[in-house]
Structures are given as C-alpha cells and as structure tokens.
Amino acid sequence: MRTEIQELNAIANNIAEVARGLGLDFYPVHFELCPAEAIYTFGAYGMPVRFTHWSFGKAFYRLKTQYDLNLSRIYELVINSNPAYAFLLEGNKLIQNKLVIAHVYAHVDFFKKNRYFAKTPKDMLERMAAHAQQIRDYELKYGRLKVEQILDAALSIQEHIDSRAHVNPKVETNEIELKRPYKVRRKTSGSNYEDLLELDIENTGQREVQKSPNEDLLLFLIENSPVLENWQKDIISMVRTESLYFSPQIETKIINEGWATFWHSKIMRELDLSQAEVLDAAVMHSQVVQPSRLTLNPYYLGYKIWESLAEKEDLEFLFEVREAENDLSFVRNYLNRDLVEKSNLFNFRKIGAHWQVTETDWTKVRDNLVQSLVNGGHPKINVIEGDYEGKRGLYLKHIHEGIDLDVVYLEKTLALVQTLWGRLVYLETILDSKKVIFECQNGLVTRRHILKNNEKEN
Amino acid sequence: MNDDIIVNRDDWSLHRKGYQDQNRHKEKVQEAIKNQLGDLIVDESIILTDGKRTMKIPMRSLEEFRFRYDFNKKNHTGQGTKKMAPGDILARDNAKGKGTGSGAGEEPGIDIYEAEISYEDIAAILFEELCLPNLDDKKRPLIAHDKPEFNDVRKKGLMANIDKKRTLIEAIKRQARDAQTDESLKITPDDLRFKTWEPHPNYETNAVILAMMDTSGSMGQFEKYIARTFFFWMVRFLRTKYGNVEMRFLAHHTEAKEVTEEEFFTRGESGGTRCSSVYQLALEMIQKDYPPAHYNIYPVHFTDGDNIGSDNSRALSLMQKLVEISQVVGYGEILRTHYSSTLMATLKRITDPKLRLVTIRDRNEVYGALKAVFS
C-alpha cells in the first residue's frame, strides 16, 4: 500500500497537470504536510522562519485558541517564492487537501504572473531566515529589550513605505534592497560589520536632508535619523524589506483569494471524484466563500467578481485581468450593479449610538469599497521635511482623504516614531474638518489647532 | 511526471517559535498587570467575592499601535443576509467594547486587548513582591501530629485502599503470561494491589494575625474598605508561608473588645479613640492563647490616628512590648484629610525595624502599604 505521502505526491502532480492544462502558469511548488501548530505559527509570522517579536506570539496565541475552540481553521498557506512553499494541514481529509492543492496552484500562478509581484524577491524564505539570524545576533550583542524597542517602533510604521517601488523601482529606494542579497551570503563570510560599513558609506553620500514629500517613512528614518545607530538602522531596513515584500499581498487580497477560489472550483470539476468527495468539496467550498456578518469576506467578494467575469468573457481576458489588476482596480472596474444588489452589499456607519445602513446604491457601495482599499487600507503619511523650523524636527503630514485618524493610536504611534527620530516629531492632520498639528517631544504628545491655512501647504 | 511538485513531511516538533514569542507576550501581560497592581488589588470584584471572580482588564500596552483610521468615523461596507435599506439599524454600540479574552474584538478596528485576570494571577504576582520579615523557623508547635502519606504499594492491605489501576494491570499481565485467550478478564486474589501509607511527623508552623481596628466615629466606609483589603491580602499571603494562620479581630474606640469578622468590617461606633486599650487586649490575648515561643505573631492596627493625647505615652509603652514579642507589627493610618497625627509621631520613637508605620491616603496605596509591612 502506498503511504499517505506517496499518495499526496501523486495527487499533487495530477492536479498540477490538470491546472496547467487549463492554462495556469505557476512556479514549482513544495508542499509540506504539517501539524496545526506549525501552520498557525506560519500564519502568525507570515513565514516559516522570521525574527522574534511578541506581536507574533500574540497572533499565534489568537490563531491557535480559535483553532482549539474550533472557531476557525486555516486551510492553506502559500509562500510567494520560487519554488513556492505551501503547507497542508495534517489530519485534513484527502479531498480537503485536493481542494487546497488546487487553490494553492492558482495563488502561485497569481504570484508569478500578477505585475504587482514582479519585483518581490523570490528567495524571501532565505532572506527572512537571515534577518532572523541577524536580529538574534543583535539581541545577543545589545540586549533583547533594546532590539524589541526598535522593533516595536519600526513595526508600528511598517506600512509607511513606498509600495509602488515594486512596480516602478527608482534607484533611490532600491539601494537598501541591493544590500540584502549580500546579507544572505554573509552567513558564510566572517565579519559582522561589512554591511554596516556599507551602510555608512551610503549615509555619507546622502547627508542632505530631503525636502520633497516622501511616502517612505522607514527609509527616511534610516537615511536621516540623527540618533539611530547602524545596527538599529539595519533592523529598520530589514522590517522595511519584509514590509515591501508583504505589501502586494495586502493589496491583492480580494483578487487573489477570489482567483484561487474560482480556480479550485474549476479544477475540482475536472478531477475524477467520488460522489462523497464531490459533496465534501462542495461543503468546504461553501465554507470558504461563506459571507461574514457585516465585514466582507474577501474570498466571497473576489470569487463572485471572477465568476461574473467568466460568464461574459473568455479565459484569455481573465488571464489579462489577473496580470494587470490589484484589489482597488479590480473592484473599481468589475464590481457591478448586479453583484452589489445580489450580494446585499451596503454602506454603514456609526450615527449616535447606532450602526446604521447609510447607502445601498451600487455606485456608492463600490466607491466606498474602493476608498477603503486605497493604500492597502492604511492612511497615507508623507514626510514633509526633516529639519522643521531649522531644529531638525521631523514633520509628517497625513494626506487626509475624508476619514479622520484614530487619535489614541496616532499619539501612541507618534511617540514611537519619536524614539526613532530622537528630536521633535510633528504630524499634521485634519480632525473634524479642522487642521491640527500633533507635536511629540520626549514621548509626550501635545496638539494645537491651526486656525488659518497659511502654513506650509503642498 | 515532473519533480517540480513535491509533497513532503518533516518533523515539526522542534518548531517552538510560536510558543517562545507567546511567552514573551505573556511576560508583557504580566508586566502590564504588575504596573496596574496598585489598582487591581483593591478591586471590589476580588475582595468582596472572596477571590472567586475573575476580572477583565484592558491591556493598552499590548496593542499594536499604528496610524489608522478612526473606526467610529468611517463609512464601512458590509454584507447582509437580506436586502437592506438606508436607515436600517445593524447594531447598538456597546460602550464597553467587544474585546474578548483571546484578544481582538470581532470587528476590525476594535482591538481592545483584554486579559482575564483571576485572583490567583494577581496573588502570584503580588506575593512575588512580598516577603516575610523576621521569619522564625524554630517556632514549632509543641505537638507534631502524624500525617499519613500514601507512598507504597503492597499485596496485602485494606480493601478500601485497593489500587484499581495496578490491580487491573496485574490481571492483564497474568492473563498475557498464561496465554489465556478467554475474553473476560478475571481478577484473582494474587492480582490485588493495595496502597499503603507511612506516617510522617508533620510540623506545621503557626501564625496568628491580630487585626485591630479603630471603630470610633471617624472611621468610615472608605477606611474600613482599605483595612479589609489589606487584611484580605495579608491572610492569603501568610497562608502561603504558614500551614496554619489564625485571625482574631479586635475593635476599639476608647475600650477594646474581640468581635467577629463581620462586625469588624461593618460595625461603626461613635466616641473617641484610646489606642492603648486595644494594645492591652492584644497583649493579654497573646499571653493567654499564643505563646510567642510557638507562634509567629502579626499584629496590625488600622486607625485614623486621632488618639486622645493623654493616652499616647501608655500606647507607646504597650506598643513597645507588642513589638518585642511579634514578628512584625503594622501600624496604618488611613488619612483622607491632611492633618498630622500625634500617635504616628509618638510611635516613631520606637526604632525597632519590626514596627512598620504606613500612611494610606488613597485606594491604590494599599499595595505600597503591603510592601512596606512585608519587606
């Protein structure tokens, strides 16, 4: 009798053949069969090996508790790399794994073909392992607490990078990137400091404090912070590299999950399944696309849009869409009236003490959804200058797009940014239609209202 | 078949990363609790339910801060199970938030991280900070009573002490040995195993708390609650160190008498204050019931310090005696107003470090008082 592994190998190869026959184009895939605990670890960290931080422990605990209480299950996890890595849950039924395998191939096809992923490094597994090792070394050298403080601060602003650097890389944003492959090789070389020296050279070459607006807060801090030491800059640049790697995944959640769901159901129809298997697969599929209460299930939404596209267009067109779009453009271009109405989508907001439906008109719903997808759902913060009022103050500006920021979070985060900058840090934003500047000094945040708009505008 | 598709199974049992960082997260929870300890230990839900209830406390320091939109000001898009119309109400806002024990709230954006804290958690952290001063190990009760300890298994014994598991194992082993194929398992007398014990002399150290409180007119609800909280933790702390902790309650105004615990914490009387009366009663009680050679004695006295001036010198000399025969004496003045007390000033003349003087002005100073007495 064949072992489970041999059987899964045969199945995975068979499904790959079917998927490729249907037109999917994916990297080689290595599946690992692992216990729930391992899967939840990868889920929490986003990668099998990643640096240590308590926030991952918190996420792991949450995922695992939900699993233990039978509230949720992660069915699949795919790493965007070449070869791609995917993880199958031990104890899943064979038919569940068949569906997961099909789902995974479509994800890997998306990683390979979608242009937002074109610039993501395909050896991230090794790079992130090297980061973990390097950060571990820093912990031994400088103490766990000091490393944690830097990570706490860097992670709080990890979304504030120039995510478009992937699509249209400029020389400037790539400098730190270029350094990393070298770091991976470093494992075998002797000195700990070679790449730090390199960092120094970069810095002296770029002494001039930037004046133009800059989305990449992390990079700005690395290049211009008056207080950060080289090892601290190195940690921030690792966080930045990882954030750049993850950012296209955040911006393609709906389209990618929809794509994978669309394809797993298509592939399952091509497979030779028993009656019972067909039923199990249908149950699992319906769990995946189950609409959630109030919040939108990206699997559901993405799947529905792809399905409606497939009704009208040929596969060739679908392949083009998966190459060119991200969530924002996908929803804007293809979420139509029919879908909004059939899925009972609506806008809602808090009015007084109640959460109330505000709009059901399909264009309003679509536009609101599109707006929530701008910048991966994160507020846009620009660095205006690093020498505010001639005192090396860091001046940040929130590009207000109609929604105010959470003030408690703003103040706490600003205090963290201040630890990285050392001097005064400012954030300009708009609260209840009034311009406000938050100022942070020694961890203390104060705010002042600006009455006239005669301050620097850009 | 090509080999670009591989399914593999590794040993993941050594992959402990998630647990390691979970531990760091737990450490941070503990730190956060520690920082709030002053408030936690005076919480009614612990004190008034005798430590049976757990409570939830928000853990702001464990949120992952970032620049984010104000959830309450945002227009969201959702999905309904039926057709919705503008104006339909979806939910009422719970002011308390929707945080759960495991972490984030159900909805994105509501990320109030709460930790569920039980009495044990708080006790563990609190007691870690406290220690017993002047612990005298020599104080054993005169009679050590024997305590049975089950630590052996024999073939003969009392049927009430039969070890069912071992007996069954013996029966199964015998059946396997004899290669019996009979399906039913029979237990023969030879299979029987009994648990037996050996007597161990058990020396328990004893401690007694003499809880003394001023019940004169000036001691109100607040003062009693503070005293109660202090005694609540004190008893529990001493129980971790001593096998047997007794507690006696002495109430006084101008005269002292022994009262029940309930009376102690609820009764209020009027009149002046003569602290020497209760010290005298405590000394008599010790002489009669708790010979200092065999007991660890912890007298603690709570008052607002407003003692009759003429009584101070007598109180001082009695307190001197009390300090000599006790492990630690606590004297706490609960002051909500800012007048300085004469009794505290008088007692300060006793230089013996066994006398611990504390002033409590606010609820959360109980923690500091506990640390001052037990350090």
Image: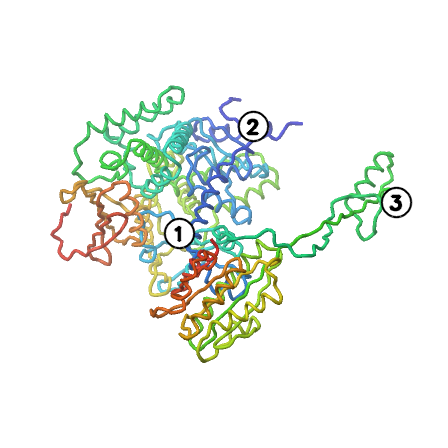
User: Could you tell which of marks 1 and 3 lies nearer the N-terminus?
Assistant: 1
Closest to the camera, between mark 3 and mark 2, is: 3
User: As rendered, which of B319 and A4 lies closer to the eye?
Assistant: B319
Chain letter for mark 3: B
What residue is drawn where x is 84% and y is 45%?
B192
Residue carrying label 1: B108
In the rendered structure, the answer to whether residue A4 lies left or right of residue B20 reads: right
User: As rendered, which of B109 and B296 lies closer to the eye?
Assistant: B296
Q: In this view, does A138 lie above or below A403?
A: above
Q: Can residue B79 be seen in this view?
A: no
Q: Are marks 1 and 2 on the same chain?
A: no
Location of residue A162 in the rendering, given as x and y in whole percent from the top left corner? 27, 37
Q: Do labels 3 and 2 share a chain?
A: no
Please state which amino acid type lies under the numbered disc 3: Pro
Chain letter for mark 1: B
Q: How many labels does the image show?
A: 3
Location of residue A417 in the rendering, given as x and y in whole percent from the top left corner? 28, 44
In the rendered structure, the answer to whether residue B293 lies left or right of residue B43 reads: right
Q: Quadrant of residue A364?
A: bottom left
State the mark number for residue A9: 2
Q: In this view, does B248 lie above or below A271?
A: below
Give the Cα separation between the discs numbered 1 and 2.
39 Å
Residue carrying label 3: B189
Please state which amino acid type lies under the numbered disc 1: Pro
